[in-house]
Every structure is written in structure tokens, then in C-alpha cells.
Amino acid sequence: MIDKHLKNIDSVSITWIEQWYTAFIRNKFRLNDFQILRTDRSGLKHYYKVNVTGIIENDRLVRLWGIQNDNTDTVYAETALRESEEHFRALAENSPEIISRFDSSFRHLYVNKVIEKYTGKAPAFFMYKSFRQLGFPEEFIEKSEAAINFVFQHKTANRVELQLQSGIWIDWLLFPEFDSQYQVKGVVSSARDISEIKNSEVELRSAKNKAEESDRLKSAFLANMSHEIRTPMNAILGYSELLEDSDLSTEERSGFLKKLRKRTNDLLNLINDILDISQIEANQLKLFRHPASLRQLIQEMQDVFSAMGLTEKKNIVFEIQDELPNEIDQIIIDDKRIKQILVNLLNNAYKFTNEGKITLKLGLVDSSRLEFSIRDTGRGIAADRLEHIFDRFRQGEDESFSKKFGGNGLGLTIVKGLVENMGGKIYVESEIEKGTRFSFVIPFERNV
């Protein structure tokens, strides 16, 4: 179109020139990087970048000088990039996961709004800052920077599990973002909450450990049961054979019969314990509630304590603290099972107390609940053992415990089962060399 008059230029070119000229006048006789759109006959759009300078002579515009470049490829590339960015942002903003983009300095170039759910901070708080600048824990910083750096160095995806300050676990997937030269220009990542999965794994490991521990304790328990059963049985057989001797004096015969009865009672008590624990674990234990006197029940414990002193003399004072209102005595309870609980706890206290005091206390929690407690001044129980004290197949601190103190290790398990079957709860508190306190709270009905 050089040195051509407008009348010799095609109509399409005239339209371009008119567009240039209009923009040229509007921009005071100069036009830089002005973009013109042209649609060809096939409907394809072409973009041109135009620079125009006016030639002024005698204060008059006499000529336009312009340069036009085809900018179509650049425009289409920029449009595709912009649409890609918009598509990425739309997906990221609607994702249930934390979507982020990082540069090689570990700074956030983008983060979606989901981050606020897990950190309490809006996306703007993270922009152009690294985890270090944001004050995250050092361990988290080291792991996150190592994960990002891996993607930059190896040009491949990476995956790590991280724990946030809130305790939430995330599964973090990181992907490289390449430029036109196949160099990593950034890292895009997605993080999803896997706390439930991690907690399930912990619970499964815990359940597995408990099952293995239960099997180990069951084996130890069965071995101990074998000993516990054989000991009285051997004694019963032995004394039975001795009683067949016709030359025994009356005093000797009486002594053997007394020992025979004791060993028979030991065996009967063991069998009753095994039956009780079986019924408790099978939820088949039946309670027989009827009117009974609480004070009479408590006074019977004095007789139980006195009987303990006959078999093993100890310098122990037994005290009963009755804090019940005078009008409360006859109530509806299973007095046999409550007595069983108290005898077990009293036996336990006596066994592990060499001297001092054992206190049995009874009182009201409220109008429908009773509290019993037995406190001793014995050896106490280590804090790490308290949480297992009621576990089945356990006794004291280890399997050798029963050899020193006797018993089959079922007593406290039965006590807990009986209390819970009555709709109550049992508690224990202890301090080494200062003593232990067992208490239980159960509901009751007044005998009207």
C-alpha cells in the first residue's frame, strides 16, 4: 500500500486504515502496539499489532507512517494460557483438597480457600511466603521443603505424608510445572486429609497389640490356673489318703480335716471365680435384687477382716466409716454380689498391706446412688499399671506376682464386671508406698 491513494486501495485495507487513523487521532498523532482484528473469508480471526507515527509539516499532518505485524500466534497462545489458568483456578477453587503452587524458593504462588479450613488462615495470608516465613514447625518445614526440592531436581512427581500443627494428617501429592524449555518453573500440589485413615491404622495396631498381649496373658493365666487347680486337688487327695490311716489320733484327724476343708474351699472359690468371669464376659450374669440391710452388710465386713487376721497376723487397723443418713438402711440391692465385691477388695487391701490401716467407707452420692470405698496404706500400684489393673488374665505387675502374693488374678476383673452389671462404675487411685483406694458407685432403690 506504499504511496497508494485511498481510492486505489481495497475496502478491507481502507477499514484498517480508518481504524488506525481514528486511534491515531485519539492518541495525539502516535500509536504504539495497537491491535487490530481481521476475520478472513473462512471465518478465521487474525490479529495484527500496529505502530503508527504521524509526519507533521507546517503544523499539518501530511502523512502516516505505520508498521503492521501479524500477532495471531501470540494472541492465540496468550488466550490458551489465560484459559488454562482460568480452568486451573476453577478446578482448584472447587476442589475439596488443598491446592497450592510453589516456586523454587518454596514460596506460595497460589493456594485455594480450602487451606482456611485446616489452618484458620485465609489464602492471602500464605501468598508469596514460604512455610518458614509463616512460622511453621521446623520438622514440617524440613519435610515440605525436601518434598518440593525433590520435584525441582528430579522433574518428577513426589508424594509424602505430613502432619499439620492442628494434628491433622495430610497426603501431599506434588507435580512439576514445566516451561517451554522443559524446565521446572514451579510445583503444583494437592493435599487431602487422611487423619481418619491414620487413626484407623493406629487403632488397628493397638488392637493387634492388645490381641497379642491378651493371648500371651491367657497362656500365662492358663498355666497359672493349672497350678492353682492342682495345688488344692493334690492337697485334697493327700489328706484324704492320710485320713484312711486308722492309727491317727483324734487331734491329727481333726487337723487333717480342717486342712482338707480349707483346700476344698480354695478349689470351690477358684471354680466360682472361673464361672463368674465366664458369665460376665458372656453377658449372662444375673442379679437378684431384694430388700437388704446395708448396715448389716457393712458389719459383716468386720467379721471377714477378723477371719483374715486368723490366717495371717498383721499390724493393721480396720475402720468402718458409715456416712449414710439414719433413715437409709433397707434398700433393694443384690447384697450377695455387693458382699462379693467388698470381700474381693478387702482381700486385695489386706494382701498388699503389711501394717497401717484399711478403711471401708459408705455414703450417698445423691438420692439414687451409693458409694463404697476401701482405702489401704499398703505398697501401692505404679501409675503405668493402673490402666490395666482390671484387665482379664492380669494380676499385679507381671506373671510372677501371683507366686509372691497368691491369688489367680481374676478378682478385680470380676469386681469390675459385677459393678458394671449393676449399672455402676469403679475407680482406682494409688501412690507407691502410700496406698491404694478403690471406690465404686452403684444405683439403688429404697425399700418403701
Image (cartoon, rainbow, N blue to C red):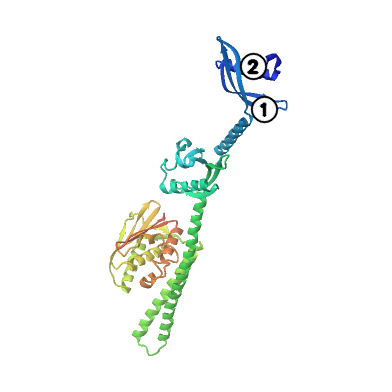
Classify mark 1: helix, strand or loop.
strand
Looking at the image, is mark 2 or mark 1 earlier in the sequence?
2
Depth order, front residue of 405/322: 405
Q: Distance between the residues labelled 2 and 1?
A: 19 Å
Mark number, residue 18? 2
> Around disc 1, counting alpha carbons within 10 Å, would you say few (fewer than 14), some (14 to 19), or many (20 or more)?
few
Residue kind at label 1, given as amino acid type: Lys
Q: Relative to 32, is 334 on the left or the right? A: left
Depth order, front residue of 415/179: 179
Q: Which residue is drawn at 61% across and 18% down?
A: 20
> Which of the 4 image quadrants contains residue 252?
bottom left
- Find residue 106 and report its horizontal and vertical position in percent: 47, 42
- Find residue 123 and report its horizontal and vertical position in percent: 48, 37
| Residue 177 appears in view | yes
- Find residue 119 and report its horizontal and vertical position in percent: 46, 41
| Residue 293 appears in view | no
Classify mark 2: helix, strand or loop.
helix
Image quarter where the N terminus lies is top right
Q: Is residue 155 above or below residue 399?
A: above
Residue kind at label 2, given as amino acid type: Glu
Q: Is residue 47 above or below residue 315?
A: above
Mark number, residue 45? 1
Q: Relative to 352, is 30 on the left or the right? A: right
Mark number, residue 54? none
> Around disc 2, counting alpha carbons within 10 Å, would you say few (fewer than 14), some (14 to 19), or many (20 or more)?
few
